[in-house]
Image: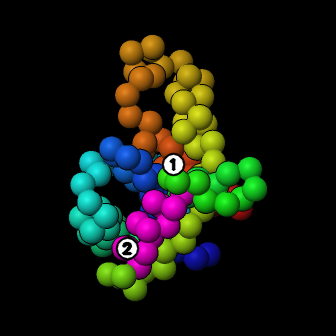
């Protein structure tokens, strides 16, 4: 079986959610949140995490509209992908993230998290949803 960790990115306006797969590439887990600064700084921080975790692939979540075209946020995700690709040899793919935040919110609700814990950052959970859908495809 292929042994490779995959890093997934949920790029947001304020925070970037990061998730990572297990070594077999079958289970996604939340890793951390990076505060968005600039595209170059974000790319460097993502690559630092990739190096620390011996990642073989990076997946960037991209919002698409009903016709499958990138939304405004989706175009920002594509530019982040470009910034990452410009400074690494690790393959970087875009993946449709539509509905990942809603799925993360629902998952938190399904876990019977207290109301106070349901607010706040869903970024790392959304990245986990993005990665798990990628792994399952």
The residue positioned 40% from the left and 86% from the top of the image is 89
Residue 46 shows which numbered tag? none
- Camera-side residue: 57 or 5? 57
State the image coordinates of residue 9 (x, y, percent, origin top left): 45, 57
The residue positioned 51% from the left and 62% from the top of the image is 75
Q: How far apart are marks 2 and 1 (CA)?
A: 19 Å
State the image coordinates of residue 68 (x, y, percent, origin top left): 72, 59
State the image coordinates of residue 60 (x, y, percent, origin top left): 50, 62
> In the image, is residue 31 above or below residue 107?
below
The residue positioned 68% from the left and 51% from the top of the image is 65
Residue 84 shows which numbered tag? 2
Q: Is residue 5 left or right of residue 14?
A: right
- Camera-side residue: 13 or 89? 13
The residue that mark 1 highlights is 128
Q: Is residue 23 visible?
A: no
Q: Does the magenta stretch include residue 96?
A: no
Coloration mode: rainbow
Q: Main secondary structure of the magenta part?
A: helix
Span colored in magenta:
74-85
Q: In which quarter of the image is the N terminus?
A: bottom right
> In the image, is residue 49 above or below residue 132?
below
Q: In which quarter of the image is the C terminus?
A: bottom right
Q: Is residue 42 visible?
A: yes
Name the residue furthest top: 115
Instruction: Find numbered disc 2 in the image and state the secondary structure of the residue it sits on.
Output: helix
Instruction: Find numbered disc 1 in the image and state the secondary structure of the residue it sits on.
Output: helix
């Amino acid at each position: 079986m292929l042994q490779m960790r995959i890093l997934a990115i949920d790029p947001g306006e304020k925070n970037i959610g990061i998730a990572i797969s297990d070594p077999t590439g079958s289970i996604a887990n939340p890793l951390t949140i990076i505060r968005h600064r600039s595209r170059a700084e974000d790319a460097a921080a993502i690559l630092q995490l990739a190096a620390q975790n011996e990642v073989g692939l990076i997946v960037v979540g991209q919002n698409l509209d009903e016709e499958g075209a990138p939304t405004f946020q989706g175009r920002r995700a594509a530019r982040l992908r470009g910034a990452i690709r410009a400074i690494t040899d690790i393959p970087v793919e875009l993946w449709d993230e539509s509905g990942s935040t809603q799925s993360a919110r629902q998952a938190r609700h399904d876990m019977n998290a207290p109301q106070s814990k349901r607010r706040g950052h869903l970024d790392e959970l959304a990245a986990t949803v993005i990665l798990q859908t990628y792994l399952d495809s």
